[in-house]
Image: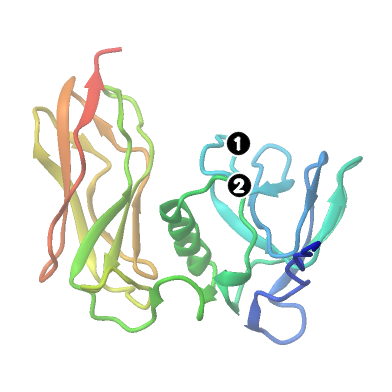
C-alpha cells in the first residue's frame, strides 16, 4: 500500500502574530532550491538573500533570521517569499530544518529566533517560566589559533529536567577560563536573552589545552570539553 506523507501547510507553525503585517516581511530567496513552508532561514550578508539556516555556513546564514510562511520554488531563479520574522508565537513542531541538524543546533536557533520575538509556545523542550538553576554549554569551539577569533560560545539556562527557561532575561552568566594558561578576551559577564547567552569572537592568547567555565549566582556551573589552542 502506498503511504503519502502530507507536507507542512503554509503558516501551520504560527500560533499567533501581531496585527496587520507587522510579523511578516517579503524577502528574496537564494536560487537553486525549493523551500518548504516553515523552513527556518538565515540571511546571506553579502546579497541580502535568504536561504536555509545552516550553522556550518560562514556567509551570514549560520544565524537563524526568519521562518518561511508558505512553500516557494526558487529552482530556476531567486524569487520572493513571505517570512515571519518578528513578534509571533510559533510551534516548532511545524518547522522545516536543513537536513542533518542536531537537536542542539535547533535549540540554539530557536533561542536566536526568540530574541527576534518568535516565541516557541508548544514545540520542543522550552519552558516559559523563570527559575532555571542549571547552566549548559550547547556550542563552543573544539579548538583554534591563539590570538584569533574563535567560534561562538553559547550557554543556555535550564531547569533540573534539562528544559530551556525561555523567559529568563535577567540572569548574568560569566564566561572564564577554568583550566589552562593564558588570558581570555571577549568573555566576562553577559545577561541572558530568552534563556540563551552568547559570546562571539572570543580569543585565547596562549597555545595549549583550555577548559572554559560558565558561572552564575545560584546556578550549577558548566564546563566545556578541552579546547585545543595552537600557535598557528
Circle 1 crowding by C-alpha within 10 Å: few under 14, some 14–19, many from 20: some
Q: Which mark is residue 182?
A: none
Q: Which image quarter holds the C terminus?
A: top left
Q: Is residue 58 positioned above or below 16 on the image?
A: above
> Who comes first in sequence, dot 2 or dot 1?
1
Does 94 sit left or right of 76 as displayed?
A: left
Q: Residue furthest front?
A: 1
Q: Judge by depth and name the residue closer to the eye, 61 or 1.
A: 1
Q: Are marks 2 and 1 in contact (CB under 8 Å)?
A: no
Residue 20 picture quarter: bottom right
Please give the name of the residue rendered at 23% of the width and 74% of the height, measured from the top-left corner. 132
> Measured from the top left, where is residue 70 in percent x and y?
79, 66
Q: Residue 56 in the image: x percent, y percent?
A: 52, 37
Residue 170: quadrant of the picture: bottom left
Numbered badge on residue 99: 2
Give the Cα separation between the discs numbered 2 and 1.
Answer: 18 Å
Q: Nearer the viewer, residue 35 or 1?
A: 1
Res. 59 mark: 1
Quadrant containing the N terminus in the rendered view: bottom right
**Of 20 and 133, the residue lying toward us:** 133
At horizontal 53% and vertical 64% (from top left) the residue drawn is 113
Amino acid at each position: 500500500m502506498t503511504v503519502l506523507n502530507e507536507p507542512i501547510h503554509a503558516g501551520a507553525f504560527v500560533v499567533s502574530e501581531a496585527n496587520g503585517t507587522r510579523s511578516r516581511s517579503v524577502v528574496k530567496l537564494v536560487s537553486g532550491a525549493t523551500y518548504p513552508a516553515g523552513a527556518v532561514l538565515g540571511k546571506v550578508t553579502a546579497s541580502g538573500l535568504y536561504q536555509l539556516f545552516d550553522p556550518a555556513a560562514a556567509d551570514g546564514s549560520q544565524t537563524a533570521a526568519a521562518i518561511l510562511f508558505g512553500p516557494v520554488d526558487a529552482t530556476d531563479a531567486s524569487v520572493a517569499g513571505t517570512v515571519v520574522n518578528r513578534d509571533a508565537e510559533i510551534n516548532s513542531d511545524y518547522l522545516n530544518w536543513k537536513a542533518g541538524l542536531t537537536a542542539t543546533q535547533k535549540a540554539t536557533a530557536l533561542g536566536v529566533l526568540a530574541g527576534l520575538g518568535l516565541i516557541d509556545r508548544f514545540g520542543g523542550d522550552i519552558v516559559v517560566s523563570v527559575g532555571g538553576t542549571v547552566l549548559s554549554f550547547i556550542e563552543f569551539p573544539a579548538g583554534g589559533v591563539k590570538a584569533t577569533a574563535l567560534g561562538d560560545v553559547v550557554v543556555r539556562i535550564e531547569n533540573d529536567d534539562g528544559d530551556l527557561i525561555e523567559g529568563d532575561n535577567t540572569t548574568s552568566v560569566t564566561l572564564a577560563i577554568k583550566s589552562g594558561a593564558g588570558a581570555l578576551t571577549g568573555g566576562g559577564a553577559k545577561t541572558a536573552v530568552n534563556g540563551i547567552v552568547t559570546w562571539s569572537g572570543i580569543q585565547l592568547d596562549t597555545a595549549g589545552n583550555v577548559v572554559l567555565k560558565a558561572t552564575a549566582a545560584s546556578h550549577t556551573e558548566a564546563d566545556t570539553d578541552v579546547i585545543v589552542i595552537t600557535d598557528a
